[in-house]
Image: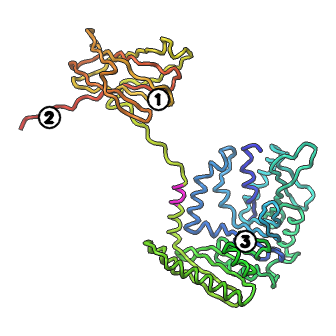
Amino acid sequence: MKPPLRPLLLAAGLFTAGLAHAALNPALVSADARWMVHADLDGLRTTALGQELVAAIEKAQAGATGGAIGLDVAKVLKTIGSLTAYGTNLTPDPKDIDGALIAQGTPDLRKIGESLLLQGTIAEPKVFSEVTDLPFPAYAITSTPPPRGEAPKMELIIAFPPEPMVIISKSRAQLLKAHEVARGTAPSLAKAAGSPLGRFAAGATGAYLFAASVVPTENVFPENAPQTRMLRLANAGALALGERGENTFAHAELLASSGANADKLTKILQGMVAALSLAETTDKQLAEFINSTSVARSGDTVKLDLAYSSARLATMAQSLRASMEPPAPPKAAPITSGRTIAEWNATASTAPDTDPANAAVTRTIENVELKNGSTITLGWRLNGGKGVRYQRVEITPAQGGAPLVFRGDMMQSGGGRGALTARFQFPGADGVYTLNVTYANDPEGKVAYAVSVRDPRPAASTKK
């Protein structure tokens, strides 16, 4: 796939149409769902942590689009109200997961989405295609073109039904079923009294992220892992994250497979919380967070609640983002001191290094005002070029006369990290001079040269 179209996949997974709220609506979830995830992005954006996440997205948007298309990813994300996903099977292999994703938000994103997908069908017809056998507009996305002679394998279908939503799924059957559920013509979780997920739905109130699932029959974790032993005591579980007041909260529920197992789960979680509270910490807020954790049992359901300062979490997120950013390159050491009188670059040459043209080059700098005791600095920045040195400097009075000659071994060397200098003091009388600087040229043309002068400080006055 060509790089300019990569952002289309990102946008295609988020298309939506307008609804006034973003809270979890069980009527959108099929009654036979075994797992569901709901993200209230409208709610998240109003929290301290959400604002930090938006800032991180805005900073990273150039990398997300590669600058290839005129799509402001951060602004597009702000038009998304919520995402609700669910499925009827549980498998560790992502390609085998079924179900659907329902997106809701502002009307503008639907227009953007259809426009981008249509552009994709023109620019990359082997990747993007229109689906014509559905009762509403839809598009298919295939990650890689199929081998010659084979039909394209659709990996994702994005549909735009007349209802204020966009439905995304891996198959036509699942997509049509999700549409029927959303329209109320097929059983939904809102009317499935026996579904454990329906019991958890009330816990999504005020949460910007909610997830619930029945316990899979196959092991998700290693056989003897603590998580595996705990899951064997439960039939289903849910987790809600949100913000109340100044704190971010987490609310977890486990539906035990029996009353005896509910008692065991309660004791296990209470023991873990008690052990955690004994941990030594110098962070007062962290200690308050640990001590605020509570475990309670209601019938066959065990609940865990905790809260932490939202401002503190935002600060931690900022620190984490800063730690992940590449360090700033070290500041280049200066190659001048005082006033710069000449700057130039090496002259690239195809001649061998031993060629006389590369052995010695003289640069003339005229009308240089010097004072007795002035420090003359010859600098050069390698920039990956060859290490060369100044060979000599001849200083001649502008009106003529015998030159003063300073060889490289008479100069004081300095600098580092590819920025080198050679200094010497001018012992002659105050006046205007011509400098003839002889140096070895870098035949690769990478080295930058500079000559600068720093005049001596005026003598301190002895008058009282």
Choose the circle earlier in sequence order: 3 or 2. Answer: 3
- The amino acid at mark 1 is Leu
Q: Is most of the magenta stretch helix, strand or loop? A: helix
**Residue linked to disc 3:** 223
- The amino acid at mark 2 is Ala
Q: CA distance from mark 3 to mark 2?
A: 84 Å
**Residue linked to disc 2:** 460
- Percent position of residue 373, x then y: 22, 25
Q: Quadrant of the N terminus?
A: top right
- Percent position of residue 449, x then y: 42, 25
Magenta part of the protein: which range?
A: 318-323
Q: Is residue 390 left or right of residue 290?
A: left
- Residue 187 or 147: which is nearer the viewer? 147
Classify mark 1: residues with Cα within 10 Å, few (<14), some (14-19) or many (20+): many
- Percent position of residue 239, x then y: 67, 75
Q: Quadrant of residue 104?
A: bottom right
Magenta residue check for 403: no
**Residue linked to disc 1:** 382
Q: CA distance from mark 3 to mark 1?
A: 59 Å
- The amino acid at mark 3 is Glu
Choose the circle earlier in sequence order: 3 or 1. Answer: 3
Residue displayed at 74% across by 88% down? 258
Vertically, is 445 above or below 174?
A: above
- Percent position of residue 146, x then y: 87, 47
Q: Quadrant of residue 451?
A: top left
Mark 3 element type: loop
